[in-house]
Amino acid sequence: MEAMRIAIDARKLRDYGIGTYVRNLIRELARIDSTTRYSVLCREQDCEVVRDLGPNFHAVTESAGAYSIGEQFAVPLDLRREHADLFHAPHYVLPPLTPCRSIVTIHDCIHLRFPQYLPNRLAYAYAKASMWAAAHRAARVITVSEASKRDILSYFNIPESRVEVIYNAIDERFWREPPADEMDRVRERYQLNAPFVLYTGTIKPHKNLERLIEAFNMLRQAPFLKHVQLLIIGDEISKYAALRRTVHRYKLHKHVRFFGFVSDRTLAALYRLADVFVFPSLYEGFGLPPLEAMASGTPVITSNVSSLPEVVGEAALMIDPYDPEAIAGAMRRVLTDASLRSELRTRGLDRARSFSWERSIRRVRDIYDEVLNA
């Protein structure tokens, strides 16, 4: 009997967010399945990564841009050449000419909730049409939280039975304690000589960083917290000028530090060196950074909206992200209460352990069989 042929779009392998999902999807599939033939659509520089997964993984070079007109034709051609029985689109683009059964992962509806992030109305129309078509055409829609499932059902009016929630999990690197010399290197390189509050993630308006900076200013009004710093890690900070303006408005330029992109090794150390991790986002499909901080043993403060309560459970301090005073109060509590910090560390580690990429991807693999055998 000939092996099943499953194609996966991995062109976003190196991206934030979806890239984490794609990397763990193909890595876990390689661990649990050595008989299915996987055709992995990827950029030329990622072909070696795919080939290293095993003899049943075949790299298919695809240069069509994500969210481009070209991908609408190039991807179906790849699927025909590979004789794919099933196609998994790990983001919301599922070309109309797809010649086989398909599954789509829709992580969130952020482009519909926050259309101002897109460059123009045409981009919004493309995103909305693509998501609608993918949700209606796919045999099954996978999403990453009950909150995202509610959004998908609300926006796209598809049967609830076709939408399955499969949680994300944490990359293995965040479970490993960095060596002492690595921790010392990061502490010295970034001159981390005072307690600090950490944020890491993308730098976009819905991440609510202006209110975080305002709350940090309130926190520092207490004389015994004047020495605390705020570290903000994320790419494309230069595109969000309002953040710098907020820092200067409160005269915090010596106390708020923007690091931009850092390596995974450095990030793992920074999570562990932080006194508290704050993630006041207004909307998340899942929200991995709070879990990564928990796995690193760092107390977490996060929002009581969207998917975040579902992800962190009882293991974090929850705040109203629209209330800077509430954010400041939660930071003050964690920074000044050693027993609370200890309790949050213990709860956070337990909560983080409840998420597993292996368990999640085994369920994805089961869905492949269910769709193919339907």
Image (cartoon, rainbow, N blue to C red):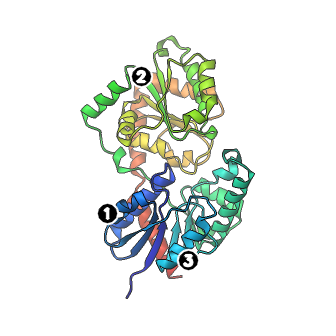
Q: How many neighbours does mark 2 have within 10 angstroms: few (below 14), some (14-19), or many (20 or more)?
A: some
Compute the Cα span from label 2 to label 3.
53 Å
Q: Secondary structure at mark 3?
A: strand
Task: Give the position of the N terminus as an image quadrant.
Answer: bottom left
Residue 195's disc is: 2
- The image shows residue 228, relative to residue 361, as above or below, that is above
Taking the spot 50% from the left edge, 60% from the top edge, the residue there is: 166
Closer to us: 223 or 57: 57
Closer to us: 173 or 125: 125
Taking the spot 57% from the left edge, 51% from the top edge, the residue there is: 285
For the residues carrying marks 2 and 1, which lies nearer the camera in this image?
1
Residue sitting at the far bottom? 1
The first of marks 2 and 3 along the sequence is 3
Compute the Cα span from label 3 to label 1.
27 Å
Task: Give the position of the C terminus as an image quadrant.
Answer: bottom right
Circle 3: residue type: Arg
Q: Position of 99 compared to 121: left or right?
A: left
Q: Secondary structure at mark 2?
A: loop
Q: How many neighbours does mark 3 have within 10 angstroms: few (below 14), some (14-19), or many (20 or more)?
A: some
Compute the Cα span from label 2 to label 1.
42 Å
Measuring from the top left, give residue 337's x and y in whole percent: 44, 24
Look at the image and tell me whether residue 294 can be seen. Answer: yes
Look at the image and tell me whether residue 84 can be seen. Answer: no
